[in-house]
Image (cartoon, rainbow, N blue to C red):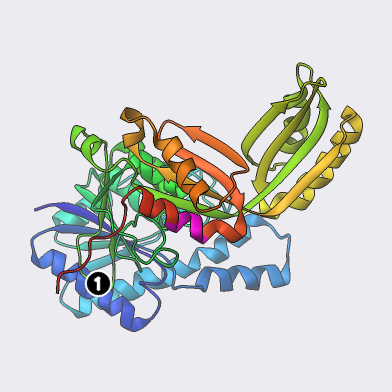
Amino acid sequence: MALIVHKYGGTSMGSVERIEHVARKVAGFRQQGHQVVVVVSAMSGETDRLLKLAKSIAPRGNQREFDQIAATGEQVTIGLLALALEKMGVPAKSYTGWQVPIRTDSAHMKARIESIDAEKLRADCDAGLVPVVAGFQGIDENGAITTLGRGGSDTTGVALAAALKADECQIYTDVDGVYTTDPRVEPKARRLDKITFEEMLELASLGSKVLQIRSVEFAGKYKVPLRVVSTFVDGPGTLITLEDSTMMEEPLISGIAFNRDEAQLTVAGVPDRPGIAAAILGPIGEANIEIDMIVQNVGADGTTDFTFTVHRNDYERALEIGRRLATELGAKGVNSATDIVKVSLVGVGMRSHAGIASKMFTALAAAGINIRMISTSEIKISVVIEEIYMELAVRTLHKAFGLEAAPSVA
């Protein structure tokens, strides 16, 4: 018998029929003798609807009240799922975040979990009940309801699994696992049986939407085995776990991620002197604009070109700041582009194998794709290219590194 935390997202909870389907899955695990704690999101689109209502009254209203409103979406789904389970003969009990309680800081709409008292949930499991917990929410030291930000239900599921010392946290979604890349871009993408926390964290940060980044960070920190599985198709899914010696013998590259939300700026002809990087990046950071990739090229004339990328939503503000800085610093000007994407290779095998970068660059060159920027880490290589070549680049690299699914046998 194992203790398993199930987390079901908004798509899985999108209708009464789907909630009843979830109840049948939970009941099946109970019949196998497992203890199950369930975490659920609001129905698909419900949180957006609630926040739209709030903003129609007060676009810049009190965020405490926004949280009060947004948290009601999960309150509906926990009650519905508990009713569906009881109708099937499975005793269940629903809990909001504050009833557990899940204690957070007071950063409304982006709160972070500080502690969880899991005694009620343990007692329910020992008594044969299935606790159904609202994801995405908690309570602060002042007794105010808080929410954890987009994708916060994943974090709730992992945090509960850590607090309960669960054997596994299973994230149920509308895909049947983590793939080598997006199957909509490369139809030959292959579902991975296993991937490390490090690799999943890189993929999530680089554009993969399967899991919320904070949930992967939490799982890695507390060593909670994660499994991504489909609500609608039976299968083993993908296990996200610690790296072991056998994984070093697996393929060098686990996945290819891409991000279309990039914009590039170059402050050209900046006087090359100590502190110039801080003089440029400081004001950008003070404007709460996150910088991704950075390249600095020093010329023979005593000037430097300073190139960096930001999220496309921040492009206009970053460009405005960049132009002001160029004038103040005596630079030649600012060049910019929004028609770019970032494509990244991720794999723990890079630690022990040389030549990955050269193989990547050779494959892209053979496909006629020019590289504009390069960034590397221990298990990642990212390049910035023109947006029109994004799909070609992904398919080219997927083939070059042998990530295709094996052909089916008739």
Is residue 177 rendered to the left or right of residue 276? left
Check disc 1 and report the residue beneath it.
233
The single residue placed furthest to the top in the displayed view is 274
User: What residue sits 26% from the left and 54% below the top?
Assistant: 238
Q: Is residue 235 above or below residue 215?
A: below
Q: Is residue 26 above or below residue 334?
A: below
Asked whether the viewer can see residue 103, the reply is no
Identify the secondary structure beneath mark 1. Answer: loop
Q: Which residues are magenta?
A: 391-395
For residue 280, which quarter of the picture? Answer: top right
Number of marks: 1
For residue 165, which quarter of the picture? Answer: top left
Asked whether the viewer can see residue 376, the reply is yes
Quick one: 130 or 210, which is closer to the camera?
210
Quick one: 275 or 142, which is closer to the camera?
275
Is residue 137 rendered to the left or right of residue 401? right
Q: Is residue 88 above or below residue 181?
A: below
User: What residue sits 34% from the left and 53% below the top?
Assistant: 157
Quick one: 95 or 359, which is closer to the camera?
359
Is residue 90 rendered to the left or right of residue 403? left
Q: Residue 259, how many percent across, how many down?
A: 54, 53
Q: Residue 95, how many percent across, how many down?
A: 35, 61
The single residue placed furthest to the front in the displayed view is 366
Q: Residue 12, how many percent across, how many down?
A: 35, 72
Task: Kindly identify the amino acid type of the residue bearing the numbered disc 1.
Answer: Val
